[in-house]
Image (tube, grey):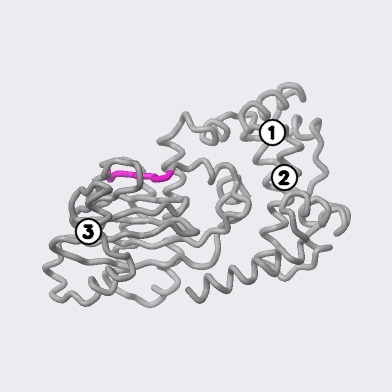
Amino acid sequence: MDVVSDAISAVHLGHPRFHRLRTSGSWCARLDPYDGAGFYVVLKGHCWLLTDGSAPLPLGVGDAVLLPHGTGHVIADLPVDAAAAKKKAVPFEQWLVETASQTQPDSYETEVLCGKYWLDCSRMHPLMAELPEVVHLPSRVGSHLELRAAIDLLAGELDEMRPGSCVALPSLLDLLLVYIIRAWMTEAPSGTWPRVLGDPVAAAALRALHSDPAAPWSNDRLAAAAGVSRPTLARRFTTLVGRPPMAYLTWWRVIRAATLLRDTPDTLATIAGRVGYGSPYALSHAFQREFGTTPGRYRAQAAKRSADVETN
């Protein structure tokens, strides 16, 4: 896979949870910090988002917001400061019950699609870790057409529950996450990973490593795949990514092994072969050095986390 796909897949758990909120009048809700990534898409009207230490952020129709690190926040009909939010905001779950009990849907002033992606943040790819506390993508004519199309498709599925909607909605929400991250990368050209993936040498090397992490890579072979000399690859890759190519590969192989332990029933021997280790022992040693636990214990803990996600 490519770097962005791998970075998302490494942390993504289960199906996203979502709600369609319709409300009017004065309202203010608080969501405490949590493990995962929250999102909002404004379908009608407007609202305001407030995180600790930031100014209230206005959100209008078509705006998309991602809170990739599960930051606690307040969402309200009007801008509020931290002091007012502390007094006025009700817990988010309570607000969900209150909005669900409202009648006369045609009179709703504000409609918001919101929810969360469940993430395993035990070893997050630096691309995901670099995402800011709030990714705000305002609706602008001609901007981020793929994201706008995904939002339109989501709104259409919500307006009319058609055959297959139970499959289509979670899939569209997963697509929304990909498009938001893509859009952020185009809006943050000075960020580390937008620069990494915009550099032809580093990007080519990463594509090669991520497409086949089990291959017998060496600095010489990777430099040939990137079309540059070994010193050029070492200098460009290390400067941009923050670690030498083979160190990155070793790290990524262990992260990939953790994903396979979490998501498949494959034996440790099978997983070792899939990520480029010659034996289960060699993988287990590298895994314990990175995660501080054995592959077997990690798998058991991951199974418990996944079960908790399914029941919440």
Q: Residue 156 occupies which quadrant of the picture?
A: bottom left
Contact, CB < 8 Å: mark 1 with mark 2? yes
Work out whether mark 1 precedes mark 3 in sequence or the reverse, and give the earlier one: 3
Dot 2 amino acid type: Trp
What residue span does the magenta drawing correspond to?
133-139
Residue pictured at 22% horizontal, 66% vertical? 22
Q: State which tag comes first along the sequence, 3 or 2.
A: 3
Residue 202, position as x, y percentages in the image: 64, 32
Residue annotated with mark 1: 243
Vertically, is 218 above or below 174? Answer: above
Q: Amino acid at mark 3?
A: Lys
Task: Please say whether residue 65 is one of the residues in the magenta stretch.
Answer: no
Q: Residue at x 74, y 66 (%)?
A: 297
Give the residue at mark 2: 251
Crowd class of label 2 (few under 14; some 14 to 19; many from 20; radius 10 Å): some
Q: Earlier in the sequence, mark 1 or mark 2?
A: 1
Q: Is residue 263 left or right of residue 166?
A: right
What residue type is disc 1 on?
Answer: Arg
Disc 3 secondary structure class: helix
Disc 3 residue crowd, few under 14, some 14–19, many 20+, Cα 10 Å:
some
Q: Nearer the viewer, residue 6 or 191?
A: 191
Asked if the residues shown at circle 3 and circle 2 are in contact, with their CB atoms under 8 angstroms apart, the answer is: no
Question: In what element is the residue under mark 2?
Answer: helix
Up-down relation of residue 176 to residue 81 (above or below): below
Residue for point 62% across, 71% down: 304
Compute the Cα span from label 1 to label 3: 47 Å
- Asked which secondary structure carries label 1, the reply is loop
**Residue with the mark numbered 3:** 88
Q: Residues within 10 Å of mark 1 (few under 14, many from 20)?
A: some
Residue 75 percent location from the top left of the image: 28, 55
